[in-house]
Image (cartoon, rainbow, N blue to C red):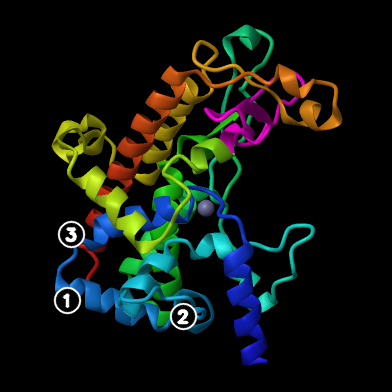
Amino acid sequence: MRITTHILLGWLLLVMPAAAWNGLGHRTVATLAWRQMNDAQRRAATELLKHHPHYKVILTVNVPDGVDQGEWAYLTAAVWPDLIKPAKAGQPAKPHSITRYNVYPHGINLPFVHSADAGRVSLADFVVPEPNAATGLSNSIVTLKDTTATPHDRAVSLAWVLHLMGDLHQPLHAATLVTPKQPKGTGLGGACTVRNERGKPINLHTYWDRLPGTNAGYADIMALADSVANAPELAPSRLPEYRLNQTPAAWARESFDHAVQFAYAEDHVKFVDTKAVESGSIRRSAIPTLSPEYVREAHEIMRRRIALAGQRLADVLTQVAW
Ligand SMILES: [Zn+2]
């Protein structure tokens, strides 16, 4: 059975598309924190992850040549919550021993309306669903820091902290557009289709998830981490929100503001309804293309969010009484 699970998971890891800041984005955030941890902290985190229930079947599968197994397990823990989601239609089923750990959503549906709908839509009765990425991150930080919790629970919580810190900083994980027809919101950007800079149709959520890049080899991770860490404008002292906002709820609100003021903003982007494209009621030729200004600013925001997520993750991990 163990061998079968190994083969199944190894295959899954190869074929599964990354969701949320992709593998590169999540591992880069984790790397930025790793670089601020001292040797004892790194060793303790690595030892703790050996108690993770999927250490052998996910975290240490496919360690790249020349990369330390402990470091790779840590970097893969940052992607692990994306690998334990139940299989989608057409994907091979995953065992309950894997999916039972899929306990937190990866986003938070904070509502907003476009100005054209202001006066037609009330948000008074909108209830933000719980749990969500912000409450999940809060809970996971508490358990990780609780040295009386079991090593199993702390290892699982460490993986959630590594992952949700990244997702909560992705603007498209924090805002849902509410329209007169959809008073409960339209999701987290999957309903909005644009063309990217290469002319390819893509929904806004996926566009933002892939902004860090799509090659997630070890060298790619180190290169993005270097580029963010060495950018003077991304030093924490240059980012006023770093000092102002110190809770997961506040970090979610920052992402929400980027989403509303830029990512979905009517004066920055035009998009069409994904379902209407799929059903053919909107012609594919009518899908608007992102402007070069949008593409440039989206990259800048992504880098700023990765820098902040990495620094805040470092703050958490260097304060744990390992
Ligand atoms: Zn995620």
Q: Write down the quadrant of residue 193 in the picture.
A: top right
Q: Amino acid at mark 3?
A: Gln
Label 2 CA crowd tier, 10 Å (few <14, some 14–19, many 20+):
some
Identify the residue position indicated by label 1 in the image: 40
Q: Is residue 240 above or below residue 236?
A: above
Q: Write down the quadrant of residue 96 in the picture.
A: bottom right
* Residue 77 position within the rendered picture, expressed as x and y whole percent measured from the top left: 43, 67
Residue 225 part of the magenta-drawn span: no
Total count of labels = 3
Identify the residue position indicated by label 2 in the image: 55
Secondary element at tag 3: loop
CB under 8 Å between discs 3 and 2: no
Secondary element at tag 2: helix
Identify the residue position indicated by label 3 in the image: 36
Q: Is residue 257 above or below residue 212?
A: above
* Residue 294 position within the rendered picture, expressed as x and y whole percent measured from the top left: 45, 21
On the rendered structure, is 43 left or right of 7?
A: left
On the rendered structure, is 137 left or right of 206?
A: left
Residue located at (52% from left, 27% from top): 197
Label 1 CA crowd tier, 10 Å (few <14, some 14–19, many 20+):
few
Which residue is farthest front? 198
* Residue 246 position within the rendered picture, expressed as x and y whole percent measured from the top left: 28, 42
The span from disc 1 to disc 2 (Cα, nearest Å) is 20 Å
